[in-house]
Each structure stands twice: as C-alpha cells, then as structure tokens.
Amino acid sequence: MDLQNMLQAITGRQIQRVKEALTSVKGEHLSRTSTADHDQHAPRYASITKEVDDLIPSEDGKKLCLRFLSVRGCKSTKAVPCFSGRAHFEPESLHAKVKAVIRKRFGGIKPKYASL
C-alpha cells in the first residue's frame, strides 16, 4: 500500500468516526429535549415566500442579506461567509414587504438604512 492510499484509508476512518459521534450526539440531544424546551426558544419562521424573495434586491447575481440591514446584523466574517451566499450592500431602495420581513424576523432595520 502506498502512502497516498494509506492516508486516504486513515482519513476515511476518521471521517466515519466523526459522523458516528455526531449522530450519537444529535440523538442524545433530541431525546433530552422536551416540547416545553421548544416553547422557550425564539420563534421559528417559515421560509420567505417567493413573492417577497423576488422583491429582495440583487447585486452581482447574489440576493441581499436581510440580516445585514437589520438591527441584529449579520454574523458573517471572512472565514465564515454569509448564509446561503447572500451579499452585503446598500440597495437604492427596499420594498415595504421586504422591510416588514426584516422588522418581524430580525428586530428592525438599522437606523443607518431607515431611509431605504
């Protein structure tokens, strides 16, 4: 067995162990979580409707990150890119329905972008 094959075999076994550990941890977490715990967490929202998604501005083929304009902000960094490949930019305008989604999901629009 050459070095490359040996390294691939070792890496494959390590990946399998990590997957098994993650599956085990997820199973334990789910079994410990009660429905009462779910009530205490932040509300979950349905996906953005196609109608609203079509109203979100784009730049260079990427949709605007709504968190970027929100009070909560986007937690992306150079090492961890924005969710779903969304873009950070200041649009010329923002449709009222998109503003409503930002208010409802992310706590409002940053004062800096209030004029949009």
Image (spheres, grey):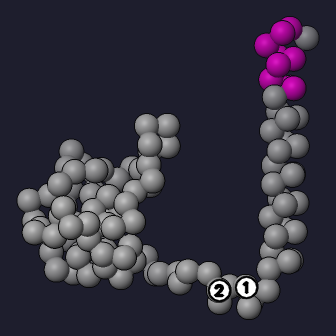
> Element at badge 1?
helix
**Which of the pair 65/111 is nearer the observer?**
111
Q: Quadrant of residue 58?
A: bottom left
Q: Looking at the image, do the residues carrying marks 1 and 2 touch, with CB atoms under 8 Å apart?
A: yes
Q: Residue furthest top?
A: 2
Q: Residue at x 38, y 73 (%)?
A: 106
| Relative side of 70 to 97, left or right | right
Looking at the picture, which amino acid does disc 2 mark?
Gln
The residue indicated by pointer 1 is: 37
Compared with 115, 76 (above or below) is above
What's the magenta region? Answer: 2-10
Looking at the picture, which amino acid does disc 1 mark?
Asp
Q: Residues within 10 Å of mark 2 (few under 14, many from 20)?
A: few
Q: Residue at x 32, y 58 (%)?
A: 68
* Magenta-drawn stretch, dominant element (helix, strand or loop): helix
Residue 6 magenta-drawn?
yes
